[in-house]
Image (tube, rainbow, N blue to C red):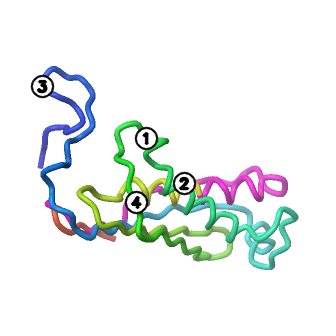
Amino acid sequence: MSQPLSHFDESGASRMVDTSEKTVTLRIARASACVEMQPATLRLILDRKIVKGDVFEVARLAGIMSAKRTADLIPLCHPLALCNVALDFEPQGTSTVKIIATVKVHARTGVEMEALTAAAVAGLTVYDMCKAVDRSMVLREIRLEEKSGGRHGDWQRNS
């Protein structure tokens, strides 16, 4: 299913998509990222023994703040007045944390980029908070999990 790229005009010049004719609807996007680390690092995080502080709470704030600033980071994103940004942290086994970012807005355009940005920046924050004890951490699988609302309707990643 190939669609034309909407961020380019007929001559190939970059452009912001004109959303003025779109309907305002509730848009929701959920994205995730995984941070792989040494088992001892995850244990320190869960026991709240990382010297810099509560890793998940600092990463949660970073994710929320970054979602609100997505339009400042990604050139053709529309600035949006977000209704909600939520981040959850789920340990997976003994050495991975899965970060889930959910973003909601009533708008003419979706919030996929805001959810992806929140998950990615939260993952980078986990790395920053823990790099003194584990420089081998890997941020991986930053991906959209699902979105709803808008002209294209609902979409969900197949597991």
Q: What residue type is labelled 1?
A: Ile
Residue position for label 1: 74
Image quarter of residue 149:
bottom left
- Residues packed near mark 2 inside 10 Å, few (<14), some (14 to 19) or many (20 plus): many
Q: Is residue 148 left or right of residue 124?
A: left
Q: What residue type is labelled 4?
A: Ala
Task: Check whether the beta carbons of the residues at disc 1 and disc 3 lie within 8 A of each other.
Answer: no
Dot label at residue 10: 3
Q: What element carries label 2?
A: helix
Residue position for label 2: 66
Q: How far apart are marks 2 and 3 (CA)?
A: 32 Å
Q: Which amino acid does label 3 sit on?
A: Glu
- How far from the left and from the top, in percent, is residue 29? 35, 66
Q: Can residue 30 be seen in this view?
A: yes
Residue position for label 4: 81
Q: Which of 151 and 128 is in front in this view?
A: 151
Q: Which of the two marks, 4 or 2, is nearer to us in this view?
A: 4
- How far from the left and from the top, in percent, is residue 64? 55, 63
- Residues packed near mark 4 inside 10 Å, few (<14), some (14 to 19) or many (20 plus): few
Q: Nearer the viewer, residue 150 or 130?
A: 150
Q: Is residue 105 left or right of residue 139?
A: left
Q: Which of the two marks, 3 or 4, is nearer to us in this view?
A: 4
